[in-house]
Amino acid sequence: MSKRNVTVHMKSDYEYEAVNAQGNKVQIDMYDPEEKKAQSPMDLLLSALAGCGSVDAVLMMKKKRKTIIDFFVEAEGDRNEGIPAFYKTIHLNFVLVSPDATEEEFAKVVALSVDKYCSVASSLKSEITYSSEVRREA
């Protein structure tokens, strides 16, 4: 089993910084859209899912020796109106610009990437546990 660790530190009431074991940082904020400086946790979830699905899709198309002029994923989540405002549905639109790829082969690659290889998509089905503690300054 492989473990990953991320630590999230508060910078202010609405600003946080996530740091992984290698020291890579991601800024997070909970400001209203007009004041946003970074992605919210829910934006990051969409970004993680789209990014995860992208990697294998691109690699599989390259393995098929297809030309990739451009590639992107448009991720849209429909959130619950109440609290918690979780994603009820998520739609990923994979777009490949290529002179030699077909719709059919790309659709198969996307399905494999999301349904079989994307660990983020699989993680959305996982059990989540948590704990808490209070530490006192010495």
Image (cartoon, rainbow, N blue to C red):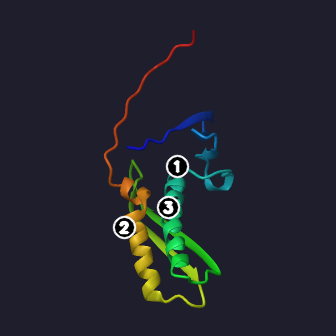
Measure the C-alpha gap from mark 1 to mark 3: 16 Å
Q: Residue at x 39, y 74 (%)?
A: 111
As helix, strand or loop, the secondary structure at mark 3 comes to helix
**Residue 21 horizontal/vertical position (percent):** 57, 38
Please tell me whether mark 2 sits on a helix, a strand or a loop.
helix
How far from the left and from the top, in percent, is residue 79?
42, 59
The residue identified by callout 3 is: 52
Residue on which the image places disc 2: 115
Q: Label 3 neighbourhood size at 10 Å, few (<14), some (14-19), many (20+)?
A: some
Disc 1 to disc 2: CB gap under 8 Å: no
Q: Is residue 53 visible?
A: yes
**In this orientation, which residue lies closer to the viewer: 106 or 16?**
106
- Taking depth in this image into account, of 33 and 77 the one nearest to the observer is 77
Residue type indicated by callout 2: Asp
Residue 116 as seen in the image, left or right of residue 7: left
Judge the density around disc 1: few (<14), some (14-19), many (≥20) Cα neighbours within 10 Å.
some
Quadrant of the drawing holding the C terminus = top right
* Residue 71 appears left or right of 64: right
Earlier residue among tags 3 and 2: 3
58 versus 130 height, above or below: below
Which residue, given by chain and number where applicable, does mark 1 sit on?
41
Q: Secondary structure at mark 1?
A: helix
Pair 1/2: label in front: 2
Measured from the top left, where is residue 56 in percent x and y? 49, 68
Q: Earlier in the sequence, mark 1 or mark 2?
A: 1
- For the residues labelled 3 and 2, the Cα–Cα distance comes to 11 Å
Q: How many marks?
A: 3
Sort mark 2 into few (<14), some (14-19) or many (20+) by Cα contacts within 10 Å.
Answer: few
Q: Amino acid at mark 1?
A: Pro
